Image (tube, rainbow, N blue to C red):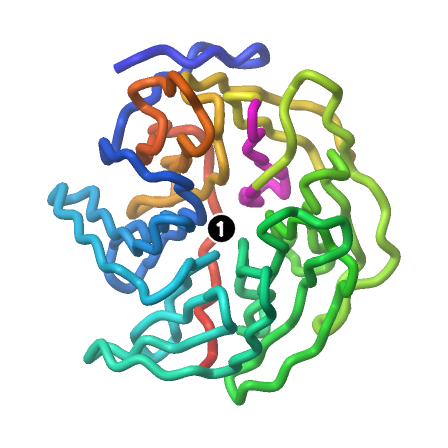
Amino acid sequence: MTTAHTPHTPHTAYEVAVAAEATLGEGPTWDATTGRLLWIDVLGARIHTYDPATGRRTIRTAEQHIGAVKPRANGGLVLNLRDGVGLLDPDDTFRWLHREPVPGRRANDAAVAPDGSLWAGTMRYDETVGGGTLSRVTGDGSVTTLLPDVTVSNGTGWSPDGSRVYYVDTPTRRVDVFDYDGELPANRRPLVTIEEGAGFPDGLTVDAEGCVWVALWGGGAVRRYTPDGDLDRMISLPASLTTACAFGGADLTDLYVTTARVGLERPHPTAGSLLVIPGAGKGVAQPAFQG
């Protein structure tokens, strides 16, 4: 166990939940139905599961690069894939829900909204400015483009009362906040701008107090911001490419953090592993995809 520095609270210990060498680990998601933590390797096209109660883990290879995986309400998984959104049934049968291949574009982060729709992000492999989107996909395959000119669509999360949605387009260095009426986001404005040299905002989660936890790509840290945008806490981690975070465990008190090693000449031994900070806070149960 190693100590992670937190300037506003006592020292917090992190552990390596799953030692791995994921090229681009991403998207930790707690599946309360199965008691497992889901996460992915985007460029390795792998879906990982981890059961903290037993230590059991599984790895499944996807047919193409994958941006996110989330539980479905009736079992199985919804996948944000390079060429669109697909469904994996409990018997491992795969089918496309919405297929829209665009040359040079891939899926990235996604989140399930309070209404059970999937907010699925995309980006260009070469990170062309404005080359990606954020879209709302429902269980019947209907698609609404929410943001048409995104560069690297990343963290998305809702306040506990559902009135706000937070969003990251990584190169902007911002965590933005929208008002949310249950269908469409409105009144976009910056909540936080990450300062130069601290890394770039990537995946995020919102805790039971309405605070936003965001992983900093290139910053080796996870930060917690209040709903007013004040920095409340920072946890430093040894892997510089921290990509996303989510609360898990039976009580939703353990913060899981994914990491990457892509492009690093001398990655830290934990780069590409799934890390966990036990007792970091209190998460909110996440909705499952209704489809």
261 or 207: nearer the viewer: 261
Where does the image place residue 47, in percent across and percent down from the top left?
Answer: 30, 56
Q: Residue at x 31, y 80 (%)?
A: 94
Q: Residue at x 30, y 75 (%)?
A: 75
In the displayed structure, 284 sits above or below 182; it is above
Q: Residue at x 61, y 60 (%)?
A: 122
Left or right position of 265 against 191: left
Where does the image place residue 167, in percent across and percent down from the top left?
Answer: 69, 50
Q: Which residue is mark 1?
A: 284
- Quadrant of the rendering where the C terminus is positioned: bottom left
In the displayed structure, 75 sits above or below 24; it is below
- Find numbered disc 1 in the image and state the secondary structure of the residue it sits on: loop
Residue ranking furthest to the front: 103
7 or 189: nearer the viewer: 189
- Quadrant of the rendering where the N terminus is positioned: top left
57 or 191: nearer the viewer: 57
Q: Residue at x 47, y 39 (%)?
A: 245
Q: Amino acid at mark 1?
A: Val
Where does the image place residue 72, in percent across and percent down from the top left?
Answer: 38, 73
Magenta span of residues:
203-218
